Image: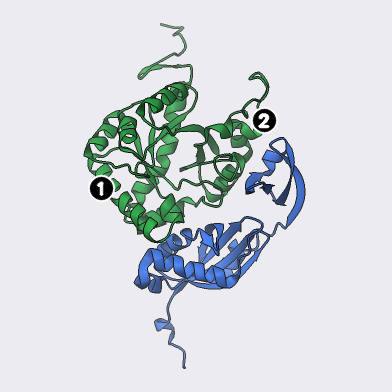
Chain colours: A green, B blue
Amino acid sequence: MYEAVHAYPDGDATVARQAMTAARYGYDGIVVRTRSALEPPDGAESEAAPTSPARDPDAIADEYGIDVVDAVEVDADGPREASGAVGNHRSEHTVVCVVGGDDRLNRYAVEEPRVDVLARPNAGSGGFNHVLAKAARDNGVHVEFDLGPVLGETGGNRVRALADLRKLREIVTYYDAPHVVSANAASHLELRAPREVVAVAEEAGFDPEWVREGLRAWGSIAERNRERLSGRFIEPGVRRGRYETER
Amino acid sequence: MKHLPKHLRPRWRYLAVGIETWPNAEVDRRAFQRALWYGAGNLLGDAGSADADLKLLSFSFSGGAGEAVVRVRRGHVEAARAAIGCVGMIDGDSVGIRVRGVSGTVRACEERYMGRAAASSTQRDVAFEDAERSAVVRGDACDVRIESGYVGAAAFDTE
């Protein structure tokens, strides 16, 4: 199972700390949503210079025995800006998420097959309906179920978050749109072990197996995209292999 | 009062719970028990909270890490796990919390899951983001002091 986390400078824990904690909690991998966490710092030495191991996903993965996936979260003001950002980042990052939270952005994200995940569709004023669910299913865009507010908030905010999650769940399961589940942790302290996440979601009315599927979906997205980004992939069903030597 | 015959006594399960905070946080036993009760009350409701009957049996905490044994009624372990997972703040300090395991006796719980954290924390200066900063180091974990608070780092970041 995978968890998608924020890392320093966006969150309060570095990628290595998140990976260390996630490995201890029993995750198979983490998806790092913060683009700048795994890139050389701005204005740093030329690109030829070796990046420090603390910013290299493979080095961190080796150190802690857990998969580290580089991702990007596109948080744009409108569909046009988002579209440009998605085009820029698609070829460089394994997972591309678009932060929803407003009707036009939600609509853009589910109608764009290059987007992997529509993150936090309910944050802000955003809504979700059957049209978006069908588009998400047809374009293979995963809708994120963000359990962060359920774990961290209290009172009215949590009630609203739970109500939104329930509505989203009813729509998404009816149309069988792909989904991912995350606790959206900004630091290692907000991270929760998979069994805790599943237990909380179960209390909120989710089917436990469905939630586990959502946690595993991050891993399958990463696997599929790594295959596509590798040089051997030409188009679906076509890949570069070795020549046949014998006939 | 005379105690109950054995077949009428409630059956319990004991959860070993690991706690982690920023190094400047102070969490005491009463605050943790209160957080558990509020967490359960808010998530499971009064009835569910009474069913799970979370009770803190032992608690230790120092230097940003701690552990506890929580007693739960048998058959309500998953509800209790959810309530424990929802404890995000104790007295305004954010906490990372995790159920390490479940046992049928207190003794098995302590022998299996407790007393491993023990790595004591020390204060020293580390190199982080091209600057020398003071940090609290506990085993592999390393909480670096920056202007706005702490950043969780690992030994791997400071090498």
Please tell me whether residue B89 is drawn above or below residue A210 in the rendered image: below
The quarter of the rendered structure image containing the C terminus of chain B is top right
What is the x, y in percent for residue A202?
Answer: 36, 56
Q: Name the side, left or right, on which A221 lies relative to B64.
A: left
Q: Who's the residue at 40% across and 70% down the image?
A: B49
Q: Who's the residue at 48% across and 32% down the image?
A: A72
Cα distance, mark 1 to mark 2? 45 Å
What is the x, y in percent for residue A208?
Answer: 36, 52
Q: Earlier in the sequence, mark 1 or mark 2?
A: 2
Which of the pair B110/A31 is nearer the observer?
A31
Q: Who's the residue at 35% across and 20% down the image?
A: A236
Q: Amino acid at mark 2?
A: Ser
The crowding category of the residue bearing disc 2, from other C-alpha atoms within 10 Å (few below 14, some 14 to 19, many at least 20), is few
Which of the pair A165/A203 is nearer the observer?
A165
Q: Quadrant of residue A17?
A: top right
Q: Amino acid at mark 1?
A: Glu
Q: Who's the residue at 43% across and 81% down the image?
A: B9
- Tag 2, which chain? A
The crowding category of the residue bearing disc 1, from other C-alpha atoms within 10 Å (few below 14, some 14 to 19, many at least 20), is few
Please tell me whether residue A57 is drawn above or below residue A216 in the rendered image: above
Q: Residue A174, can we see it?
A: yes
- Tag 1, which chain? A
Q: Which residue is mark 1?
A: A170
The tag on residue A52 is 2
Which of the pair A240/A203 is nearer the observer?
A203
What is the x, y in percent for residue B18?
Answer: 57, 60
Identify the element where label 1 is drawn. helix
Q: Quadrant of residue B29?
A: bottom right
